[in-house]
Image: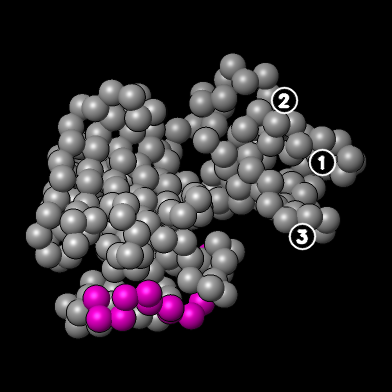
Amino acid sequence: MPQSVLRCARFKGDDTVHFLDMKVIEGSVIDQVEEAMAFVRRNTSMAVKMEGKPERTEQWEYPLDAVREAITNAVCHRDYADTGNVQVRIFDHGLEVWNPGTLPAGLTVGDLRRNHESKPRNKLIARVFFLIRYIEQFGTGTGRMIEECRRAGMPEPQFEPRGSSFRVIFRKAIPVERRFAEAGLNERQVKALSLIAERGQITLAEYAQLVKMPKRTLQRDLQGLAKKGLLVKHGTGKATWYERGK
């Protein structure tokens, strides 16, 4: 199956124009996970912190356990009938894991943020990965990704269907004030983006708890962020919620 390779790339900046490093990984699905993680370690940096303890604390740009979970899921659950490849894309301010195939029927992006049923597309691969303890088969993988990012003080990962593919997006913990200093945002909007950086999403009700202003004003704030591409709107009416955009 020639489409079963895994492609890794480190790009210059935050788009896919200029390559700094690239690797096409063949071999077994187990080898693909391990070699992809080696590529991630080679193309990301680690900081050492002294926090008043005898031992030092080492922290990578992205939580490696969360990235490993995303890559493992992509290899395990991708659609192998699709001619595309699993991809790991590393940018200056983000890391993305893509896999061919959308979510299984009956499973939504919202489900990934709470306890949900495991629905493996490739049951034999899933069984092998379970036996070697790469996955748990309890639908807990996405929850662990979220928890690892929270523990590292980083934004929660984004889960996003994209055409016939699915991607997991990790972002660096860049202060919202610095990232959007030139975007013409008001103080309330910066607070909204800070909350989304922590939680991964926001509703109008949650925004109203954070900022004591008329709901019409807050709704205009969120709509303005969506027009700038900083937020993505989902749902309608009272079920509306927003995720961070590009």
Question: Alpha-carbon distance for marks 3 and 2?
Answer: 25 Å
- The residue type indicated by label 3 comes to Ala
Q: Is residue 157 above or below residue 42?
A: below
The answer to whether the residue labelled 1 contacts the one labelled 3, judged by CB atoms less than 8 Å apart, is no
Can you see residue 37?
A: no
Q: Is residue 65 above or below residue 163?
A: below
> How many tags in the picture?
3
- The residue type indicated by label 1 comes to Gln
Mark linked to residue 186 = 2
Q: Is residue 26 magenta?
A: no
Image: magenta residue range = 113-125
Q: What residue is rendered at 38% in x and 69% in y? A: 141
Image location of residue 121, percent across then percent down: 37, 74
- Comes first in the chain, label 3 or label 2: 2
Structural crowding at the residue carrying mark 3, measured as other residues with C-alpha within 10 Å and reported as few (<14), some (14–19) or many (≥20)? few
- The residue type indicated by label 2 comes to Asn
Structural crowding at the residue carrying mark 2, measured as other residues with C-alpha within 10 Å and reported as few (<14), some (14–19) or many (≥20)? few
Mark linked to residue 239 = 3
